[in-house]
Every structure is written in structure tokens, then in C-alpha cells.
Amino acid sequence: MATETAPKEQSDGAERSAPARPRRKGVGRWFADHLVLLVGIGVLVYTFIPIGYIIALSFNQPTGKSATAQFDAFTWNNWQSICEPDGLCQSLKTSFAVSVTATVIATLLGTLMAFAIVRHSFRGREASNLLIFLPMATPEVVMGSSLLAMFIAIGFNGLLGFLTIVIAHVMFCLSFVVVTVKARLTGLDSRLEQAAMDLYANEWQTFRLVTLPLALPGIVAAALLAFSLSFDDFVVTNFTAGRTETFPLFIYGSKLRGFPPQLFVVGTLMFLVSFVLVIGVEVWRRRRRAY
């Protein structure tokens, strides 16, 4: 009897110790587990379809003078003659000059304002926080028309151009810079600065070696945001430009007199530059974290 029951006990133990086979998931269960991923992929596809369309149209040779949404024939001529439309490259230079100037001024002023609001207590601090959000919440039509009325009232009738555009762009970019830098400063650990001062660093050394490097990502992000907002602004610029033509104003005028295909080339180049910058910053951030 002992010899007969031993194999049964061993076989029962082998069956118990054998791993259970994983159950096959149904299609509905798989979709439920990957719903967030599928929605994210769908949003990305929806976002990049217009960009891909612009890239494709940059190689299109239209049959007429104006570019259309129909792809007629493949050509490299659009990339070889970017400045062929009269005023295209000049409008790009103007937009870059306006955007760089407005970005530098707005970033400097906005960073100082963010440090003052986060690090200091003063009378009118809450009112300053409220006033900073007003340009962000104000419609651009109202802002542009108000600026135009102000410039005319102070005698800037004949001076509408580069200067007035920069003033207008600094005004609405300033709010975005302050909000972005302030969010970065709020999350900083003040104990790092206190530790630097405990190691006999003065205020300037602490700011230059500890505070500024920690706040730099927020400052750079604010500058990039200000540049993009300034470069593609149309409504406020249309009110304050006078006879100066920026790139958005050139696109609007081209739509009325004939849309050149070189505009798709400029849009493709802007996307590629932005894509390379984003990828480069991400690679640099991951390598820095690894070390």
C-alpha cells in the first residue's frame, strides 16, 4: 500500500507545483488596458496630419501661380528658390528681429518680476499677481485696438512700425514669462541656497552658482514660449505694424494676391528646427541625468 500511494502523492505534488497557464485576454480587455496609449497615438496622428500635409506641399509644383491643396507634381524648385516671392525673406528677417528683441526684453523683465513676486513681500503683491494675468485673458482684438488708440493718442502716428510692434509684443509676452518662471521658482528648494551660504558663499555667488542654474530651465522655457508667441502673432501686429510687414502679415497678404508654394517650405523648415531643438534638449537632459 505504501508503494502504491507514493506515486500518487508525487504526481499530486507535481500538478500543484506546475505553473498555471496564463489566461488569454479578450479583445475588449486588451483595448481597456491600452486605452490611454491608443488615445495618445490618435491625438498625435490628428496633430501631425496637417504638418505632414504642409511638408508634402512644399515639394508640390502647382499648375497656376498660386499654390492649392491639390498635389500636382513633385519638384525641388520650391526649396531652391525660397526668396523668389517678393518680400518673403524680408518679412522673415523682420519677424526674427522683432521676436528676438521682444523675447530678450520680456525674458529679462519677466524673470526679475517673477523673482520679486516669489521671493519678496511688498505692498501690492496680490494686485500684481492679478494684473499679470490680464494680458493673457484679454482678447487680442481688444489689446491690439487699444494699443493702436494709445499710440495715436501719444503722437506715434508716423512711427508705427518696428518700435511699436516690439512694445506690443513685450507687453503680452511678459505675462507668459512671469507665469512660467514663477512656476519654476516656486518649486525650488530654498535649503540649497541656505547650504551655499553656510559654506561662506555671499549673495551674488549663491545666486550665480545655485539659484540661477536651478531656475535656468524655466527661464529658457519662458524665452522659447515668448519667441514663438511673438513670431506668429498676427492680430496685435496687424494693428500696430503700420507699413512694416512681418511674416504673418505677408502670409495674409499672399492669400489675397496668390499663395506661393515657398511658404510651405518655410513652414517645413520651422517645424524641423523646432523638432531638432526639442529632441536635442531631451537628449541633453537625459545624458545629464545619467551622469
Image (spheres, rainbow, N blue to C red):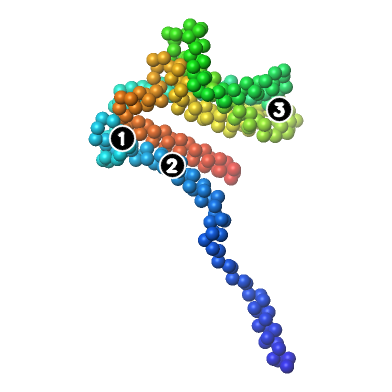
Alpha carbon separation for disc pair 3 and 1: 63 Å
- Percent x, y of residue 206: 68, 27
Q: Which residue is mark 2?
A: 48
Residue type highlighted by circle 2: Phe
- Percent x, y of residue 17: 66, 75
Q: Which residue is mark 3?
A: 201
Q: Nearer the viewer, residue 290 or 80?
A: 80
Choose the circle earlier in sequence order: 3 or 1.
1
- Tell me: residue 10, above or below residue 272: below
Q: Residue furthest top?
A: 155
Residue type highlighted by circle 3: Ala
Q: Which residue is mark 1?
A: 68
Choose the circle earlier in sequence order: 2 or 3.
2
Q: Counting other residues with Cα less than 10 Å from the Cα at mark 2, is it few (<14), some (14-19), or many (20 or more)? A: few
Query: Is disc 2 placed on a helix, strand or loop?
Result: helix
**Residue 90 relative to residue 74: left or right:** right
Q: Counting other residues with Cα less than 10 Å from the Cα at mark 1, is it few (<14), some (14-19), or many (20 or more)? A: some
